[in-house]
Amino acid sequence: MFVTEWNSSALVKAATKTGKKKNALTPMTFSLLHATDFADRLLYKIIPPLKAGMIVLADRYAYTAFARDATRGVDRQWVRELYSFAVKPDMTLYFRVPIDVSLDRLMARRVKLKFYEAGMDLGWSTNPVESFRLFQGKVLDEYDRLVDEYGLDVVDAVGSITEQQRAVRALIAKHLATVSPIAEVPSEQPA
Amino acid sequence: MSNLPEPPGGVLEGSENGIQPGRYYGRGIPYLPIDGYPGKLIAVEGTDGVGRSTQIQLLREWLEVKGYGVIETGWTRSPLMQPTIELAKSSNTLNKLTFVLLYATDFADRLEKEIIPALKAGFVVLTDRYMFTALARAGVRGVDRAWLRNLYGFAIAPHLVFYLKVDVDTLIGRVLEARGMDFWESGMDLKTGDDIYDSFRAYQNKLLREYASMGDEFHFRVVDARRSVVQIQDELRRQVSAFLEPSATS
């Protein structure tokens, strides 16, 4: 099994950091930089383990870009076609929470909301919390479109971690049972 | 859409894709409407060693004397991406897809921060290479053409695209005289062989074929770049004049 995270390739880190520090990214360069990062990780980190028959767990995937970039005003269809080089996941879990819950959780852990995370680049509000509410609210609307368009499996993320994990394991077990014998046959030894 | 009959001559191959100078090629940037901006975008394309920067410098001086506001922009010159692209080139770990996307990010940065504001303010924008450089290089490397055209759908169609064309022998002579052959210009990443001369020749030939294949699609004005600097400049000025001041030359 292999785990990969959004926005973690060494190559693009420098440019993303520069851009974010200076608040210099436009919605288009934000979108393209993340696509570059994604391409780098796809080719070096995701495709090789898939070829080796492993399960890859990706913390965020192209859908994050579809939702965020469209909210920033980038053309929806353009972003979808931009990512058409991506491998379509066998299964995508979407952890859905109302905006107030995600805001409470973030505020409990952190002092300050990040500039781009709160959509401050869009200038909708100078108050970070208000900006976050407006921006992420629209991001959630975009995710709701994606649920139908790409058949995402929705996990109710308001509940406890234990409840969520139970739901996730049930969904994944069901999926693995239909597509792969791995989950069923570990004890059987061929003669 | 009007019901008028097609003008004589029918539909050209290049015109059925509906390219309109000064507008986005494809889906564009929805949050940046550019309709009616008074500036003009002039691209000077061509492989290495055709004298693009010299010609642009001369065009710029001439246009400024005539009273135009001029800005210049060039390939991979964005402050955001230049260090990353340099790093990526020197470490040679790039694959073709990330290369294409890095170039596109650089292009988008310059488009939004330099080109569009200048067009809005009525400048003549001279661009040393344009998206066609990306299409040619990626095309040689086998990147999907339809995907590339969608990717660059946010680019603005220039009012004029000059393609400075040379044959591969002239090109080789000029590059050797100027500075020698480097790794990327020789397409050594394609790993066609260890000999840099053979690789350079094969790679530049492929690039020339890519450029040739785009000529109709993107309305290139082909300029024979084997001639002297002065002759080339005269032709460029004639065509730029005819475009900017049609009444003065008729």
Image (cartoon, coloured by chain):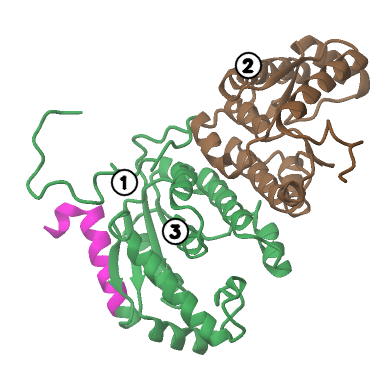
Badges 2 and 3, same chain? no
Q: Which residues are magenta?
A: B231-250
Q: Which mark is residue B21?
A: 1
Side (left or right) of A93 relative to B239: right
Q: Foreground residue, A87 or B185? A: A87
> Is residue B242 inside the magenta stretch?
yes
- Residue nearest the observer in this picture, B213 or B37: B213
Residue B61 in sight in this render:
no
Q: Which residue is mark 2?
A: A144
Whole-percent x and y of residue A82?
55, 41
Contact between labelled residues 3 and 1, with CB atoms less than 8 Å apart: no
Foreground residue among A52 and B225: A52
Residue B239 point in image, percent of width and height: 24, 63
| Chain that is green in the image | B
Q: CA distance from mark 1 to mark 3?
A: 15 Å
* Whole-number angstrom distance, CA of label 2 to CA of label 3: 42 Å
Of badges 2 and 3, the one in the foreground is: 2
Q: Secondary structure at mark 2?
A: helix
